[in-house]
Image (cartoon, grey):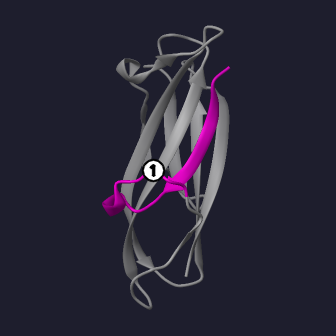
Amino acid sequence: MNKINYFYPGLPVSSNSLLPFSEMKIPRAENADIEVQLVASVIFDIPDISNIRYEVSLNDEPPFSVGNFINGYKNVLDGGNYATSIIFKFTLNDVNPKQTSTFKLKIFDSKGSFSNDMETTVLFF
């Protein structure tokens, strides 16, 4: 079982908060650059998570963040499973009011086979 426990956009990077949000007011009328952070928690059934890969994409485009999980940042759960959290920080360029952005997190097992995915959407106004 390699599955995403949660995946959500956190408040802007400058707020230093991981509170979830689904709507965000942009500071200008159009073409704003917005800092976004995505927060995820993933549960694993194996202790070595370094060969488990993730991909993050925006609006079904090719992934903008790809990598492997790090063994040093995991917790042991009751029942023998493992969990880790990860935060992705980036800037969305040219954001306009009434625009939505849908982010998708995918995870792949150590053999490269698809395991699980989850989406989250932000509305800008």
Q: Is the N terminus in the top left, top right, bottom left or bottom right quadrant?
A: top right
Q: Is residue 60 magenta?
A: no
The one nearer the camera, 69 or 12, is: 12
Residue bearing the label numbered 1:
18
7 w.r.t. 75: above or below = below
Can you give x and y, in whole percent of width and height, for residue 120 in the image? 62, 55
The one nearer the camera, 77 or 57, is: 77
111 w.r.t. 105: above or below = above
The one nearer the camera, 63 or 116, is: 116
The one nearer the camera, 22 or 60, is: 22
Write the residue at 58% across / 33% down.
107
98 w.r.t. 59: above or below = below
69 w.r.t. 111: above or below = below
Task: Using the rendered view, name the quadrant where residue 28 is placed.
Answer: bottom left
**Image: magenta residue range:** 1-20
Q: Is residue 23 left or right of residue 10?
A: right
Can you give x and y, in whole percent of width and height, for residue 21 in the image? 56, 61
Task: Using the rendered view, name the quadrant where residue 11 is placed.
Answer: bottom left
Report helix, strand or loop for mark 1: loop
Q: Is residue 15 magenta?
A: yes
Write the residue at 54% across / 55% down.
20
Q: Is the C terminus in the top left, top right, bottom left or bottom right quadrant?
A: bottom right
Write the residue at 62% across / 34% down.
4
Can you give x and y, in whole percent of width and height, for residue 64 in the image? 43, 52
